[in-house]
Image (cartoon, helix red, strand yellow):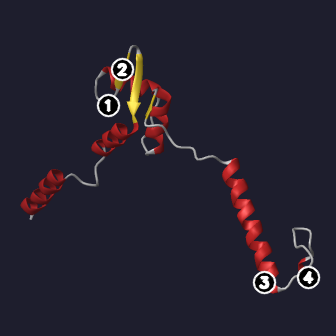
Amino acid sequence: MKQIDESTPVAALNLLQFSDLFLGLIAKAELNKEKEQPAKSQPERFGIDGAVETLCAHGLQTTKGSIYNHVSGKTIPHHRIGRRLIFDSNELIEWIKGKTTNGIDSDAALQIAASARRKK
């Protein structure tokens, strides 16, 4: 039997040979894709540029200057190693969650409802 490879005409293959060739090509393509694009994971700890990227990626558009202001006011979680600022990704994400609200504040909603009842 003739050796089947990528140069064999598709018309000369039976269904089983075609499926074997096709699956082999897909497997080879997936291996090449994994080699070309190594997994890029974000480090757990990073500097000011990483903090800006993390905050922006989670919907909080910010700049280095605003982060420095938060650091000086001690309102953002950070660590110092000498003069270098270090941020932890998990701490920043928790900080963002603490800063955001899920709609109307319950106290404000109660005050609005009470005001509406008084007006009737």
Give the image location of residue 59, x and y in percent: 44, 45
Question: How many angstroms separate mark 1 from mark 4 (CA)?
Answer: 65 Å
Q: Nearest the camera: 65 or 45? A: 45
Label of residue 96 in the image: none
Q: What kind of residue is marked 1?
A: Pro
Residue at point 28%, 24% (across, down) = 74
Q: Is residue 38 above or below residue 17?
A: above
Q: What kind of residue is marked 3?
A: Leu
List the residue tagged with mark 3: 16
Give the image location of residue 117, x and y in percent: 9, 63
Label of residue 11 in the image: 4
Image quadrant containing the C terminus: bottom left
Q: What kind of residue is marked 4?
A: Ala
Q: Residues within 10 Å of mark 2 (few under 14, many from 20)?
A: few
Residue at point 12%, 53% (across, down) = 111
List the residue tagged with mark 2: 80
Q: Is residue 86 above or below residue 13?
A: above
